[in-house]
Amino acid sequence: MKKVIIFLAALAIILGIAGYWIYQKYAINYFKQLELVKNINTKIASMKIGTPRSSILKMLGKPEKIEVYMLGDQAVEFIFFRTKVTPLFGKDTEDSFTPLAIESSKGVMINWGNKFYLEVSSRK
């Protein structure tokens, strides 16, 4: 009986340490991402068409990814920022990011959102 109690106590300690490690590694990062995403969403909501690219980058930091497409004879740069937190063990999806469309020649935002991105990126 004494061995069973010692075994159960050791198991409880091991599970407690493992649980704390998982919390430290994943949950704290998740909550940091939640705060970052909330901040980015608030800043994007305050932006207006015509906002300079430099101001966007100063406000939001480095984009997660960048893509460029032609819209008529104009190059449109899409800069993507994380606006949705991925579940703890999930993968990013297209709706994890919000694209901001920058007219390359003028360097200003001309539109934003997945709807506009899909319209431009699907043109041949």
Image (tube, helix red, strand yellow):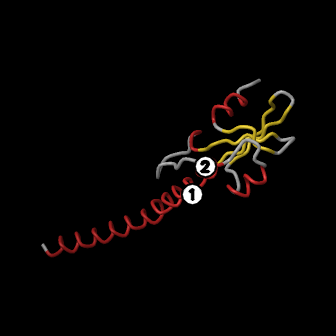
Q: Is residue 12 left or right of residue 20?
A: left
Q: Mark 1, residues whose alpha carbon is within 10 Å: few (<14), some, or many (≥20)?
A: some
User: Would you name the residue on which mark 2 appears?
Assistant: 82
Picture disc at residue 101? none
Kind of element beneath mark 2 = strand
Residue at the disc numbered 1: 36
Above or below — where is 34 with respect to 101? below
Determine the residue positioned at 61% across, 44% down.
97
Nearest the camera: 91 or 3? Answer: 91
Q: Is residue 56 above or below residue 5?
A: above
Residue 113: horizontal and vertical position, in percent? 64, 38
Counting from the top left corner in percent of width and height, residue 109 is at 75, 42
Residue 79 lies in quadrant: top right
At 18% from the left and 70% from the top, the residue drawn is 4
Q: In the image as oriented, which residue stretches furthest toward the left?
A: 1
Nearer to the camera, 40 or 81: 40
SS of the residue under disc 1: helix
The answer to whether marks 1 and 2 mark residues whose Cβ atoms lie closer than 8 Å is: yes
Residue type at tag 1: Leu
In which quadrant of the rendered view does residue 48 lie? top right
